[in-house]
Image (cartoon, coloured by chain):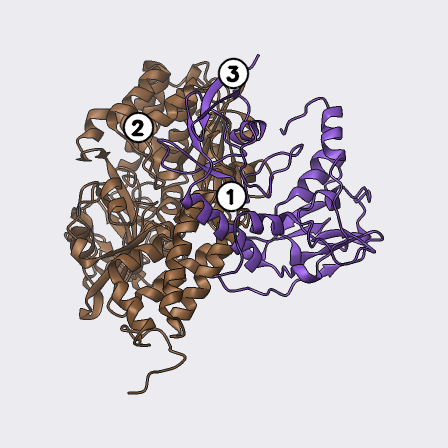
Amino acid sequence: MATVKTFKINDEDVSGREDETILQIARENDIFIPTLCNMEGLSSVGSCRLCLVEVKGWTKLATACVTKIQEGMEVYTDSERLREYRRMIVELLFSEGNHICAVCVSNGRCELQDMAQILGMNHLVVPYRRPNLKIDASHERFINDQNRCILCTRCVRVCDEIEGAHTWDVMGRGIEATVITDLNEPWGASQSCTTCGKCVQVCPTGALFEKGKSVAEMSKKREFLPYLTSMRGNGKAK
Amino acid sequence: MAINMDELKERVVASQEADAQFTHSIRVCMASGCLSSQSDLLKKELEAELKKRGLEKTCQIKGVGCFGPCANGPVIAVEPNGPMYQEVKVTDIPAIVEALDTKPVEKLVLPTDTPFFNRQVKIVLENSGKIDPESIEDYIAAGGFEGLVRALHEMTPQEVIDSLTKANLRGRGGGGYPTGLKWSTVAKAEGAHKYVICNGDEGDPGAFMDRSVMEADPFRVLEGMLIAGYAVGADYGYLYVRAEYPLAVKMLKAAIRQATKQGFLGKNICGTPFSFEVDIRLGAGAFVCGEETALIASIEGKRGQPRPRPPYPAESGLWGYPTLINNVETYANIAPIIRRGMEWFHDIGFHKNRGTKVFALSGKINNIGLIEVPMGITLREIIYDIGGGIPNGKAFKALQTGGPSGGCIPAEHLDTPISYESLSQLGSMMGSGGMIIMDETSCMVDVAKYFMEFCMDESCGKCVPCRVGTAHMYDLLSKICDGSATLDDLALLEQLCDVVKNTSLCGLGQSSPNPVLSTLRYFRDEYMAHIVEKRCPAGVCKMKHAVEA
């Protein structure tokens, strides 16, 4: 049986099981920590870096989605410094791809856009990189528009961990990294894809969307995930 | 095979007697540096020449590891007490053989009474240039496996760990984490299996310390891993070596084969209940796989990407089992400490920095090559005494240590004694041991740009700040270098340095701004000259818009 730990988030007393993360306990207590790569029901990778929090006495910032709680720790989820860092990270994401909300299927329903609004990012100080990225519309039902991808790897994880197909993966490194289907073959030609569409539904932006959707029409249906993970016997991330 | 100390000593004597049959021994450097100038051909020709003269029974030829002065290769040494020859060509061979019993060939002699040789203290490299790396008998004759046999027969695992703690050995991969503490954490961790990993994925530009150790003395690395396996309770080890080091891999493979044959690897080693096996895994050319969690992912067959720590590998590493991971040079220090005692090791170095450190000198310095020096020696002694100073009468400008994670140290700090702490205080770091010396012809902004390009190319792309931030920082540095940057760009660069340093997932990302931060700290005037005056003080950068005179 897991031990219960008590600690503080933003000076409030909270408690949780020792195998739970700072993020889980914060959510349980309605304390907001911004996230993009994290998704309940999928494994946590700690790659977007938005959930970084301050812990008293720690020299480095802690990644809330993967850091297990400790007895007596004092976590701070909000400070001018953290706000600054988070704003810059979202800025970096906007500068990396070609995120033009006005013509995007996910306009108004996009987690990246929401995050920019929440964090008060209303313009970029870093220059747009304007990369030349491809759009793969070879699949009968879905489209992969790389211009809007933020490499959160939710599609990779849901396909591997929930659907079990592992159609998606990441190719290349650094600024060249992209998500690919099979061995970088057209999505429509994929032998492993089951056309289940889970990747589309978990994608936080308009990178993966259903064919036939126009500007601002693509809303993602996420209800299946908590249902499937609870069917699997555990309601929490691995 | 139950090998004990007495039997080991007998084999040392036998090996020495075998060597004593020869009146002369010629050692030819067969490490990568000299091999690139065809030392293998030299060795063949030497053998042919000796045979021709009927001397093959009196003069022995031995292929050995690195002597140190790599830029003077190929290097050969004549024993006993004979000269060391540099830049030897095939046509020199008759003269060298001719001179075996007479005066050395003057024009080829490499003087060995110089600070380059006599200021060094060798522990890790003690066998380098002396023994044949492919011969286990040579290694045993030089005291090899004595540490292992002593640990297995005379010490408990806890005593082994205690002696490392008392010797104050710290990780030679760069961070300087106390080795004894790391070992005891893994020893205490619970797991059905435990693993020992040797990190030989040396990837810093200008660094070739670990390569030389693996090429020159592979058994020493194995012995270190074996002792580690015994101390922490592991039964399997992985040597992770980058594929760009084919000779090191060849030597290690040969070493594993021989050690297994002789009962130093496998089941019931030296007649004790301890069993240990070692396997080699090759890196596929990703710098980030030198980061421990990425390295572990790579061994597991996954994409070589770091994951957030904790949990640390000591608790949950390879396939989720407790894993000890150390650098090549750290393992190379283990056997001598057990063999000669912790007091001996503790007497070398200073304060919290004990023992020696191997450095690879490169760049604008007279003696390019591999050196091993005691901790606490000053940077000035390394550059001007051992390194022989700056060539062509140029002035020293900066010393780059720690690879792309390190920084540049200017002339005013050359009297700093080397330690993990002092180098971090200067905005650089010990790192794995690459030292690139720059003279007045180097532009520091250009240097920062070079390292940033390296970090950008080697970023795995997993986390946002490193993936996108390094690309932006590289673009800004390029703008500064071509004279099109403004002071706003410099402010943005500094802001990005702060964000990337504090929010990146792994050490590679967190330290990627260091070359920029350290050059900004000491050479801000050069940045300003590029931005405000549109001129490169060193004359390296080509300005897009040259200023009108």
Inspect this view and state whether residue A70 appears.
yes
Could you tell me residue B452's position as x and y percent? Answer: 42, 58
> Is A153 on the left or on the right of B263, as rendered?
right
The residue tagged 1 is A49
Residue A11 or residue B490, whichever sits in front: A11
Q: Which mark is residue A4?
A: 3
The residue tagged 2 is B12
Please say if the residues under marks 2 and 1 sit with CB atoms less than 8 Å apart: no
Could you tell me residue B405's position as x and y percent? Answer: 37, 50
Residue B204 or residue A224, whichever sits in front: A224
> Is A97 on the left or on the right of B417, as rendered?
right
Query: Relative to A214, is A109 above or below?
Result: above
The alpha-carbon separation of the residues under discs 3 and 2 comes to 60 Å
Query: Relative to A6, is B455 above or below?
Result: below
Chain assignment, label 1:
A
Chain assignment, label 3:
A
Query: Relative to A9, is B87 above or below?
Result: below
Identify the hue of chain B: brown
Label 1 residue SS: loop
Please say if the residues under marks 1 and 3 sit with CB atoms less than 8 Å apart: no
Q: Which part of the image, by quadrant, shows the N terminus of chain B?
A: top left
Label 2 residue SS: helix
Circle 2 packing at 10 Å, graded few (<14), some (14-19), many (20+), is many
